[in-house]
C-alpha cells in the first residue's frame, strides 16, 4: 500500500508547483526533500492554514472522506451520496474533491486517475477535531436495538442527537432520565460521564441513512439586497475617489505648515488627530485612514530629529505631480497591500491605552487578505447590489468557514472601500472590479468613470465663482491658492476674500499675474469688484516687513560699526544696519564674534537683559551615522520560485538530505520532519513501526510501537511488546522505520 509521502513523490512537477502556490507556507523555509515537504504538509499548523482557505463545499467533501474512508479509501460516488447530493450533483462534488486533492488534504490510493479511491492526509483528523460532521469518535458496543423500537420520548432524544452535536446532557430525573436510560440499555447511546450521554458514530450514520450531512452545501444566495443604478454607482465612485485624493493632498500641505510631533511610543497624539480632522473638515476616523494611507505611501514620515515630527517627503511631490487617476490608483495599491488596520485608531489596547494613528500596534497580518475577500464576495453578488455587512459575512462564512471574520472587520472594509471609491453607493464599482482583475487596470477604470474635466470659471459680481463640473488640475490649484472653496459636488463654488487673495500674494503672485490667470479661465472677463479686491490687497501687501536674524552687535560708539556692513570681507555674515549703533547678522553669534575679533575688535556676548556672558569653547558633536536602509528587492516570480524549489526537492530526494547519499533511500529515517511524517502515516494506516527514541538517561532505546496520534509536539503510541500506551516528546524521537511485514519480531 502506498503512503502519503510516496504519493507526493509521484506527483508531476506541475502538480507540485501548483501545491506550493496554493499552500505557500510549505515553501517557507524551503524543505530539503519531498519527505520533508510531506512532513510539513501533514503538520497541524500547515493543515490549519490549508483548511482555512477552503469553502464549505470542499470542507464538507473532506469531512465525508474522513468519516467514510478505510484503508482502501472511498470513491467519489460514495461521497456524493454521503453529502446529500442528487443525481446531477456528481460533477460538482468531484470538482470539490479534486480541489481538496490538489491541496494535498486528500490523496488517491487506488482506482486510476479518473475515479480514484481517496484517503485523508495524515493528521487531518486531529486538525478537524473529534466531532467531524457532527459525529462522535465513539463506536457502539455490540448489538443495538432497532431505533424504531424505542419509545417516542427516547426517539425524540435520538432525533436531537442525530445531526449533532452527538453529546447531550443526561437528566437525573423525570421522563428525560427514563428515555436516556432506555437508550443506554438498548445500546443506542453510551454514557460519556455521569452527566452526559454520547451517540456512537455507527448508530448516527444508521439514523442518517448513511449520510454524513443533511444536504449538499451550496453558496448562499442573498435576497432582498438594495440595488443601485449603474450611473449612480459610477458617479458616487468617481466622487469618492476624487475627494479622497484631494484630502490626502490637503493633509500633506497641512502638515508641511504645521507638522505634528511624534509621540514617545510612536504615532500621532489625540489632540493633533482632532485638530487635523477639524482643519480637513472630516471625521477623526476618516482622518486616521488618510494619515495611515499617506504614511504607507511614503508621503509623510518621522523626520528623525531630536524632537521628531511627521513631515511630508519628496515622494509627496512626485505623487502630486501625477494625474488624478494615477494618484488614486497608487492610494488603492497602498490600501490593498498594507497590513495596517486604521479602524483600530481610537480603540484601547490590553493596557487600556488609546491606540494612536501611526502607532506601532495597528498591524494585522490578515488585513490584505480580508480586503480582497470582501470585495470578491461583493463581486459574486448581482451587479449593482449593495448588501449589508451582515449579508456579506454570511457569504464569507461559506467561502472560509474555518476563518470567519467578525462583522466589525467586514464593516470596516466596506467603509474604507467606500471612502476610496472602490464602491459606489455601497455597490461594487467598475474601478473595484478592475482592482480585483489586476492593479494595472485600476487607473483606466476610474478615468472612464470620471466626468470630463472643466476649465471654465464663471466669475460673479458678488466675489464668488462657479466651476460647472470637475475642475482641471491647473484650475483647481489656482482656486485653492486664491479662493475659499465653499462647496463641492456636481459643481465647485468658491469665494474670494481679502485673506484668500493675500495668501496668493504671499506665495509670490502679483496682482497682474493673478488677474491674468483668472481671466484665462473665464469667458466674460474678471468682474470689477474682484479686480478692485485684488488691486487693493496688492496695494496694502508688503507695507510692513519682517525678517530674521541669528545674531546682532550693538555699541554705544557708532564709529566702531562704521564700514563693517560694507566690508566685502564680512559679506558672509549678512550684516544689515538697523540703527547707527545696531547691526543684525545672518550668522551664528559665535561666528560673528570670531569675525569681529579678526578685525581687531573686542566684542563680548550678552544675555537678553544686557549682562556680559562669558562662554567656554563649545565642544560640538554630530549624530552617529545611522545604518543605511537596505535597498528594495523586487519579489521574484512565485511560479518561477516554486518551479526552482521543486527541482531542488527532486535532487534532494535522489541524493538524500546531506547530499552525500546516492541510490534509493533506506527504509528508516533519522530526519525529524520525515520521522514525524512517517509516524502520522503509520497512525492513519494503523501500522506498526520501529521507534528509536532517547530514554530518560540519554540512552538510545528501540521499541516496536503502533502510533496513535501525532500532535502538539508529542507522539502517543502503543508499545505492542509491553501492551502499554506511552507518550513521547517529538524532540526525543531519533528514528522511525516502518514495519512492512507484521510477522517481523526482531528489531533491525
Image: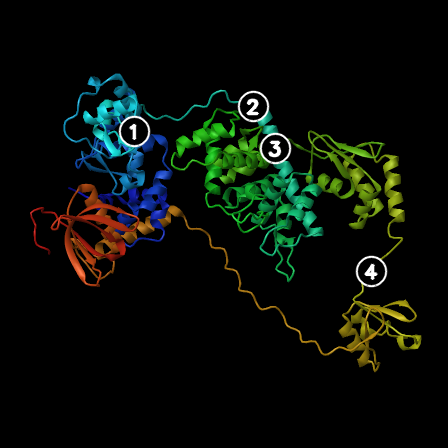
The crowd level at tag 2 (other Cα within 10 Å; few <14, some 14-19, many 20+) is some
The crowd level at tag 3 (other Cα within 10 Å; few <14, some 14-19, many 20+) is many
What label sits on residue 547 in the rendered view? 4
Q: Secondary structure at mark 4?
A: loop
- The x and y percentages for residue 297 are 57, 48
Tell which residue pokes out farthest to the bottom in this image.
600
- The x and y percentages for residue 88 are 29, 20
Residue with the mark numbered 3: 238
Q: CA distance from mark 3 to mark 1?
A: 62 Å
Q: Quadrant of the N terminus?
A: top left
Q: Secondary structure at mark 3?
A: helix
Q: Sequence order check: which comes first, mark 3 or mark 2? A: 2
Q: CA distance from mark 1 to mark 2?
A: 53 Å
Residue with the mark numbered 1: 170
Q: Are marks 3 and 1 in contact (CB under 8 Å)?
A: no
Q: Sequence order check: which comes first, mark 3 or mark 1? A: 1
What residue is rendered at 35% in x and 41% in y?
50
Q: Secondary structure at mark 2?
A: loop
Q: Is residue 256 above or below residue 454?
A: below
Q: CA distance from mark 4 to mark 3?
A: 45 Å
Q: Nearer the viewer, residue 573 or 167?
A: 167
Q: Are marks 4 and 3 in contact (CB under 8 Å)?
A: no
**Mark whose residue sits in front, 3 or 2:** 2
Q: CA distance from mark 4 to mark 2?
A: 59 Å
Q: CA distance from mark 3 to mark 2?
A: 15 Å
Q: Quadrant of the C terminus?
A: bottom left
Q: Quadrant of residue 241?
A: top right
Q: Sequence order check: which comes first, mark 4 or mark 3? A: 3
**Mark whose residue sits in front, 1 or 2:** 1
Amino acid at each position: 500500500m502506498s503512503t502519503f509521502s510516496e504519493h507526493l513523490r509521484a506527483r508531476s512537477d506541475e502538480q507540485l508547483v501548483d501545491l506550493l502556490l496554493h499552500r505557500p507556507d510549505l515553501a517557507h523555509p524551503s524543505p530539503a526533500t519531498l519527505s520533508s515537504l510531506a512532513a510539513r504538509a501533514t503538520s497541524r499548523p500547515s493543515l490549519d492554514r490549508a483548511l482555512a482557505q477552503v469553502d464549505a463545499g470542499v470542507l464538507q467533501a473532506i469531512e465525508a472522506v474522513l468519516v467514510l474512508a478505510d484503508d482502501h479509501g472511498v470513491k467519489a460516488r460514495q461521497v456524493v451520496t454521503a453529502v446529500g447530493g442528487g443525481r446531477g450533483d456528481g460533477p460538482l462534488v468531484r470538482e470539490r474533491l479534486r480541489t481538496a486533492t490538489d491541496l494535498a488534504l486528500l490523496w488517491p490510493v487506488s482506482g486510476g486517475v479518473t475515479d480514484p479511491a481517496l484517503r485523508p492526509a495524515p493528521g487531518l483528523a486531529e486538525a478537524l477535531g473529534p466531532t467531524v460532521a457532527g459525529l462522535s469518535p465513539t463506536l457502539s458496543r455490540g448489538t443495538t436495538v432497532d431505533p424504531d423500537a424505542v419509545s417516542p420520548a427516547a426517539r425524540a432524544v435520538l432525533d436531537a442527537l442525530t445531526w449533532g452535536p452527538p453529546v447531550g446532557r443526561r437528566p437525573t430525573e423525570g421522563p428525560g432520565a427514563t428515555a436516556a436510560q432506555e437508550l443506554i440499555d438498548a445500546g443506542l447511546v453510551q454514557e460519556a460521564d455521569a452527566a452526559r450521554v454520547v451517540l456512537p458514530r455507527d448508530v448516527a450514520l444508521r439514523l442518517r441513512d448513511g449520510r454524513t450531512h443533511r444536504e449538499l452545501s451550496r453558496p448562499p444566495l442573498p435576497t432582498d439586497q438594495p440595488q443601485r443604478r449603474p450611473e449612480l454607482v459610477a458617479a458616487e465612485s468617481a466622487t469618492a475617489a476624487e475627494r479622497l485624493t484631494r484630502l490626502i493632498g490637503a493633509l500633506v500641505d497641512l502638515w508641511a505648515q504645521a507638522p505634528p510631533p511624534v509621540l514617545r511610543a510612536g504615532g500621532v497624539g489625540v489632540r493633533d488627530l482632532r485638530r487635523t480632522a477639524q482643519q480637513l473638515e472630516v471625521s477623526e476616523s476618516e482622518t486616521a485612514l488618510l494619515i495611515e494611507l499617506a504614511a504607507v505611501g511614503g508621503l509623510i514620515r518621522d523626520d528623525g530629529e531630536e524632537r521628531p515630527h511627521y513631515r511630508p517627503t519628496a515622494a509627496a511631490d512626485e505623487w502630486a505631480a501625477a494625474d488624478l487617476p494615477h494618484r488614486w490608483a497608487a492610494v488603492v495599491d497602498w490600501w490593498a497591500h498594507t497590513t495596517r488596520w486604521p479602524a483600530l485608531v481610537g480603540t484601547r489596547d490590553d493596557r487600556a491605552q488609546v491606540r494612536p494613528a501611526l502607532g506601532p500596534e495597528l498591524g494585522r497580518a490578515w488585513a490584505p487578505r480580508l480586503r480582497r475577500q470582501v470585495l470578491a464576495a461583493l463581486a459574486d453578488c448581482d451587479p449593482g447590489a449593495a448588501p449589508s455587512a451582515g449579508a456579506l459575512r454570511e457569504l464569507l462564512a461559506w467561502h472560509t468557514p474555518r476563518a470567519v471574520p467578525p462583522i466589525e472587520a467586514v464593516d470596516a472594509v466596506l467603509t474604507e472601500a467606500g471612502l476610496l471609491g472602490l464602491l459606489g453607493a455601497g455597490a461594487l464599482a467598475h474601478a473595484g472590479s478592475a482592482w480585483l482583475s489586476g492593479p494595472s487596470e485600476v487607473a483606466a477604470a476610474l478615468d472612464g468613470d470620471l466626468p470630463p474635466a472643466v476649465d471654465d470659471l464663471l466669475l460673479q459680481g458678488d466675489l464668488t465663482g462657479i466651476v460647472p463640473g470637475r475642475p482641471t488640475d491647473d484650475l483647481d490649484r489656482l482656486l485653492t491658492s486664491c479662493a475659499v472653496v465653499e462647496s463641492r459636488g456636481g459643481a465647485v463654488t468658491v469665494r474670494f476674500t481679502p485673506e484668500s487673495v493675500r495668501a496668493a500674494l504671499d506665495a509670490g503672485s502679483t496682482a497682474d499675474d493673478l488677474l491674468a490667470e483668472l481671466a484665462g479661465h473665464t469667458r466674460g472677463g474678471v468682474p470689477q469688484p474682484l479686480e478692485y479686491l485684488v488691486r487693493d490687497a496688492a496695494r496694502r501687501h508688503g507695507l510692513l516687513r519682517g525678517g530674521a536674524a541669528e545674531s546682532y552687535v550693538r555699541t554705544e560708539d557708532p564709529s566702531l560699526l562704521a564700514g563693517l556692513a560694507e566690508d566685502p570681507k564680512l559679506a558672509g555674515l549678512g550684516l544689515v544696519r538697523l540703527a547707527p549703533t545696531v547691526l543684525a547678522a545672518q550668522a551664528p553669534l559665535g561666528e560673528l564674534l570670531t569675525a569681529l575679533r579678526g578685525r581687531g575688535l573686542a566684542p563680548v556676548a550678552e544675555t537678553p537683559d544686557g549682562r556680559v556672558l562669558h562662554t567656554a569653547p563649545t565642544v560640538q558633536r554630530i549624530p552617529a551615522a545611522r545604518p543605511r536602509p537596505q535597498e528594495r528587492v523586487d519579489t521574484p516570480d512565485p511560479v518561477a520560485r516554486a518551479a526552482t524549489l521543486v527541482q531542488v526537492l527532486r535532487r534532494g530526494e535522489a541524493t538524500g538530505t546531506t547530499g552525500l547519499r546516492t541510490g534509493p533511500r533506506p527504509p528508516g529515517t533519522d530526519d525529524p520532519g520525515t520521522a514525524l511524517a512517517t509516524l502520522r502515516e503509520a497512525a492513519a494506516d494503523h501500522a506498526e513501526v520501529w521507534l528509536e527514541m532517547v530514554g530518560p538517561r540519554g540512552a538510545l532505546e528501540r521499541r516496536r510501537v503502533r502510533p496513535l496520534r501525532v500532535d502538539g509536539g508529542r507522539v502517543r503510541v502503543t508499545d505492542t511488546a509491553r501492551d502499554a500506551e506511552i507518550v513521547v516528546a517529538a524532540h526525543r524521537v531519533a528514528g522511525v522505520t516502518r514495519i512492512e511485514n507484521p510477522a517481523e519480531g526482531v528489531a533491525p
